[in-house]
Amino acid sequence: MSPLKQHTSEGSDLGEQTKSDVMERGLDWEGTSSTEKTHKCEECGKVFKYNSSFISHQRNHTGEKPHKCNECGIAFMSSSSLLNHLKIHTGKQPYRCIECGKFLKKHSTFVNHQKIHSREKPHKCNECGKAFGKNSILLRHQRIHTGQKPYKCNDCGKAFAQNVALTRHERIHSGEKPFKCNVCGKTFRDNSTVLEHLKIHTGEKLYRCNECGKTFRKSSTLVSHQRMHTGEKPYHCSKCGKSFRYSSSFAGHQKTHSGNKPYQCNDCGKVFTKSSTLIGHQRIHTGEKPYYCKKCGKSFRHSSGLVEHQRIHTGEKPYECNVCGKAFPQSSALKQHKKMHNEERAIKCS
């Protein structure tokens, strides 16, 4: 008996598992779509109509692999993966990658797969020269240059260049946060955010500033931080010519020209352009100081106040005077210092 027949004839269990795999893709056994879902995964929040589909899904979290190949002993999470694997033994997948051991059915698929290991990138963008391993990735990239955004949100009309970006955006409207931190239970809209969040618990900081040695969890935060040393302010307001280091500061500034201040304080009636500014302001009335220094216990209303204070303990002085080279832990101290040079110039001129 051939290995494939042997595996498929060892009882109806495999057929039943194939049935559950069909159900897991959101179809019932007759092939009709189903919207009713009653089984919810506690790990990621995904819901299923069928208990069998729910059980199969949970293996992604537990790592359980109950379907074992009798020929070589390799185990799989689903019966469909086992059936696909058995083609190796029956000779239906003759192309084997010597780099990773993966078997492939077609020669063309095998050739494309090998490019992953060789890092060959034959598909080049005519606009910027960037190269890619696959033509499909090049086509997605070219939308940056063309501005094409074929994926549109039905709720707000916002358009996106990639389908995955639309899927992430739609969770803003649905409130869905399927990715959960196993340490603190906090949930997130996308997997990349939860991976970044996990670094808070591990303390991992991979990106170091060459100027002051400060480390950061994200490369984007390091890039923003380095602007303190370089003085770069890449965000320019076309209305007044003012420049900003951060896109968030620039976005907040633009609202000052529109005059739109939708956030009002219930205590004093003061209005603000951003909800975050209102929240910070309200602490004046409540006396709340939620940001604590772990070194000395001093508390602050704003996170920026805590960051500046912590430099007393670390000795960090990122604000340098371009006249005499003296450095300061706070930007306000540098501004005060610069007044001294301005007064000296005024005395010399007189």
Image (tube, rainbow, N blue to C red):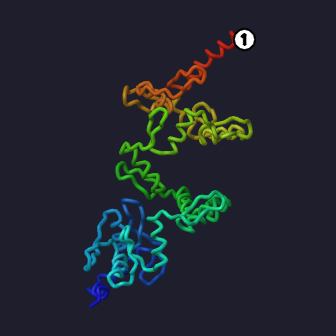
> 167 or 264, which lies in front?
167
The answer to whether residue 3 shows anywhere in this view is: yes
The answer to whether residue 336 shows anywhere in this view is: no
Give the quarter of the image for residue 26: bottom left
On-image quarter of the N terminus: bottom left
The percent position of residue 160, horizontal first and vertical second, equals 61, 60
Query: Image check: 240 left or right of 62?
Result: right
> 34 or 80, which lies in front?
80
Q: Which residue is mark 1?
A: 349
Query: Image check: 105 left or right of 58?
Result: right
> 342 or 287, which lies in front?
342
Query: How many residues crowd mark 1 within 10 Å: few (<14), some (14–19), many (20+)?
Result: few
> 92 or 35, which lies in front?
92
Could you tell me how many numbered marks the image carries?
A: 1
Name which residue lies at 48% across and 58% down: 176
The percent position of residue 75, horizontal first and vertical second, equals 29, 72
Name which residue lies at 73% across and 36% down: 240
Above or below — where is 225 with respect to 313?
A: below
As helix, strand or loop, the secondary structure at mark 1 comes to helix
Give the quarter of the image for residue 145: bottom right
Give the quarter of the image for residue 40: bottom left
The amino acid sitting under disc 1 is Cys
Name which residue lies at 36% across and 75% down: 81
The percent position of residue 8, horizontal first and vertical second, equals 31, 86
Above or below — where is 6 with respect to 324?
A: below
Above or below — where is 230 with respect to 70?
A: above
On-image quarter of the C terminus: top right
The percent position of residue 327, horizontal first and vertical second, equals 52, 23
